[in-house]
Amino acid sequence: MEKTYKHNKQNNISFIKQWIERYNNTSHDFYDDYHIDEIDNSLSKAKELWWNASVHIYNDFTSYIKELNLEYGVILCICISNFYTKTNIPRKWDNAILEGIDTPPSLYIYNKNNADIISWLKQCTLLECEYIKGTEVYYHEIKDVDDCYKTIFITQTKL
């Protein structure tokens, strides 16, 4: 039987509330991240749920921030399989994009005008796809001597 993610919006909203409270009175640029298994510990051993859970958590976080009209952004950061390149990323995603990956996706929050985040996204390649409605998808890779690290960033931030 295939496992499904038990979406717990109340838990996700509680988490983002506490997270934002730490930065509420911060006037300087900041960003911070948590892996999804730190937000919902049931995901630590449920790799087959990572993509679906990530989308739910991302949507809960962005909805909450928008509802309160906060000047924060959210980025969903996903390490992807070495099989994929910026030219062969599938148009429709599922958990297969995470095949061979051991690190759960993470979510970043940041103040919207954060120069570091904007600079970081400008170094990425903007892909022509939309996995989550109303978002931009950025691709980044870092080549190392022995490996290549590939990451997708999904955010509502438009450059």
Image (cartoon, rainbow, N blue to C red):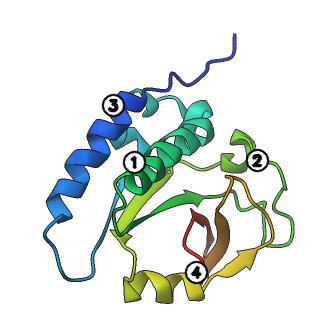
Residue 135 in the image: state x and y as whole percent: 64, 62
Element carrying mark 4: loop
Count residues near mark 2 (Cα–Cα under 10 Å), then give few for <14, some for 14-19, many for 20+.
some
- Report the residue at 52% width, 60% height from top: 77
What amino acid is at disc 2?
Answer: Trp
Circles 4, 2 touching at the beta carbon (< 8 Å): no
Whole-number angstrom distance, CA of label 3 to CA of label 1: 12 Å
Whole-number angstrom distance, CA of label 4 to CA of label 2: 26 Å
Question: Which residue position is annotated with label 2?
Answer: 93
Residue 85 lies in quadrant = bottom right
Q: Is residue 23 visible?
A: yes
Element carrying mark 3: helix
Whole-number angstrom distance, CA of label 4 to CA of label 3: 38 Å
Q: On the rendered structure, is 2 left or right of 32?
A: right
Count residues near mark 1 (Cα–Cα under 10 Å), then give few for <14, some for 14-19, many for 20+.
some
Count residues near mark 3 (Cα–Cα under 10 Å), then give few for <14, some for 14-19, many for 20+.
some
Question: Which residue position is annotated with label 1?
Answer: 64
User: Does 126 appear above or below 83?
Assistant: below
Residue 4 in the image: state x and y as whole percent: 61, 21
Circles 3, 1 touching at the beta carbon (< 8 Å): no
What amino acid is at disc 3?
Answer: Asn
User: Does 77 appear above or below 102?
Assistant: below
Image quadrant for the C terminus?
Answer: bottom right
Count residues near mark 4 (Cα–Cα under 10 Å), then give few for <14, some for 14-19, many for 20+.
few
Question: Which label was assigned to residue 95?
Answer: none
What amino acid is at disc 4?
Answer: Asp
What amino acid is at disc 1?
Answer: Tyr
Q: Which badge, 4 or 3, is on the more N-terminal residue?
A: 3
Question: Which residue position is annotated with label 3?
Answer: 11
Question: Which residue position is annotated with label 4?
Answer: 144
